[in-house]
């Protein structure tokens, strides 16, 4: 097995910070928010030992990667363009794409649009969904007293100021509240960072800040994430949310197109997404959108940060799926 590599790669007009390990068929690992490539620290060596070339970029706007000034430069299509160029930079023809949270949404659309480049897909947490009947900003709830968190994120500078006030406390609160350690999602007392935000308040106001870290997040792990966000801020990651309506408009060009490559879906039993009304039906309907879906597996006790919380289960599922291709 080769050693872990970190390098800067120029792709699609920007520079990405990339962590990689191994030799063999290419596997791209795409993180979510608020994470970085470090979220895949437990998968890189396992995939390398299994005979694959595992590559985890800090996606545009995150970590040590470039963060364009233009908010409109953070559409899903921009990110897919980065990943296509990253495959080329590796000297490969194609890759299996694996994504969690935002990375899962990107992975589904990458496989949908470019099956020639993304020969299989694994999504953690976020299922493949039909295009919504209207722009997200019109569908997500908003009242005089509270608004869905995506509306809060959409206001430039507001969430940045809140999150960057105390980056360690921010990450501890969000990581805990979205994890399986926070409690079952059908319990109203379980905190959820991806729900409603009261008018005139911040997202963090309703979240506890645990003094003891969950077992899956060591002090050195937290320090790595804090160091990244201290350097980059949260603007880049938040800009993905600021393109939700733009993404919806762009998706009109491939309305109804299925994902026509082998696929695997994994979700934690306590994932925050499962608290969204209708999510069970969305997951059940996936085979119509993903004809080659091999399985949709629920991992007991785990929450939203699946590859970090349930390392062994995710690694086994990943390696088994990759070897089956």
Image (spheres, rainbow, N blue to C red):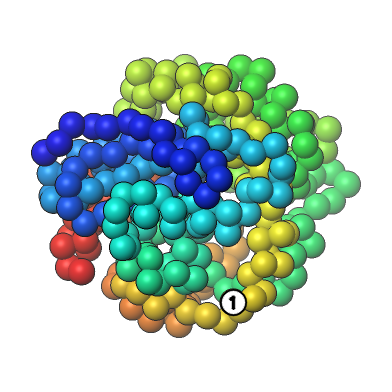
Relative side of 59 to 197, left or right:
left
Quarter location, residue 263 = bottom left
- At 58% across and 54% down in the image, what residue appears? 78
Task: Give how far across and how far down residue 136 sits, in percent.
Answer: 72, 61
The image shows residue 106, relative to residue 160, as above or below, that is: below
Quarter location, residue 235 = top right
The image shows residue 120, relative to residue 287, as above or below, that is: above
Task: Give how far across and how far down residue 66 sits, in percent.
Answer: 55, 35
Secondary structure of residue under mark 1 = helix
The image shows residue 33, relative to residue 166, as above or below, that is: below
Identify the residue position indicated by label 1 in the image. Answer: 254
- At 37% across and 65% down in the image, what residue appears? 118
Locate the C terminus and report the quarter of the image it occupies. bottom left
Q: Nearer the viewer, residue 156 or 51?
A: 51
The image shows residue 271, relative to residue 228, as above or below, that is: below
Quarter location, residue 292 = bottom left
Task: Give how far across and how far down residue 1 sits, in percent.
Answer: 11, 38
């Amino acid at each position: 097995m080769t050693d872990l590599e970190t390098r800067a790669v120029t792709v699609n007009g920007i520079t990405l910070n990339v962590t990689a390990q191994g030799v063999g068929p290419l596997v791209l690992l795409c993180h979510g928010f608020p994470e970085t490539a470090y979220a895949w620290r437990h998968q890189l060596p396992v995939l390398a030992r299994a005979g694959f070339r595992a590559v985890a970029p800090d996606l545009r706007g995150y970590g040590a990667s470039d963060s364009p000034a233009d908010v409109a430069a953070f559409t899903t299509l921009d990110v897919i363009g980065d990943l296509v160029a990253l495959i080329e930079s590796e000297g490969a023809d194609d890759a299996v794409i694996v994504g969690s949270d935002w990375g899962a949404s990107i992975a589904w659309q990458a496989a949908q649009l470019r099956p020639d480049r993304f020969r299989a897909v694994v999504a953690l947490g976020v299922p493949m969904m039909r295009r919504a009947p209207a722009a997200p900003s019109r569908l997500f709830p908003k009242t005089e007293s509270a608004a869905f968190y995506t509306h809060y994120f959409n206001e430039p500078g507001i969430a940045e100021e809140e999150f960057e006030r105390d980056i360690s406390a921010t990450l501890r609160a969000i990581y805990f509240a979205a994890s399986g350690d926070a409690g079952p999602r059908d319990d109203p007392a379980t905190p959820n960072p991806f729900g409603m935000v009261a008018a005139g308040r911040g997202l963090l106001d309703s979240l506890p800040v645990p003094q003891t870290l969950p077992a899956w997040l060591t002090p050195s792990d937290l320090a790595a994430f804090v160091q990244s966000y201290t350097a980059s801020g949260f603007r880049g990651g938040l800009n993905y949310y600021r393109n939700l309506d733009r993404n919806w408009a762009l998706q009109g060009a491939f309305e109804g197109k299925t994902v026509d490559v082998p696929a695997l879906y994994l979700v934690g039993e306590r994932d925050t997404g499962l608290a969204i009304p209708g999510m069970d039906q969305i997951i059940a309907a996936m085979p119509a959108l993903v004809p080659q879906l091999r399985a949709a597996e629920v991992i007991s006790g785990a929450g939203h940060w699946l590859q970090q919380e349930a390392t062994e289960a995710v690694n086994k599922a990943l390696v088994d799926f990759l070897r089956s291709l």
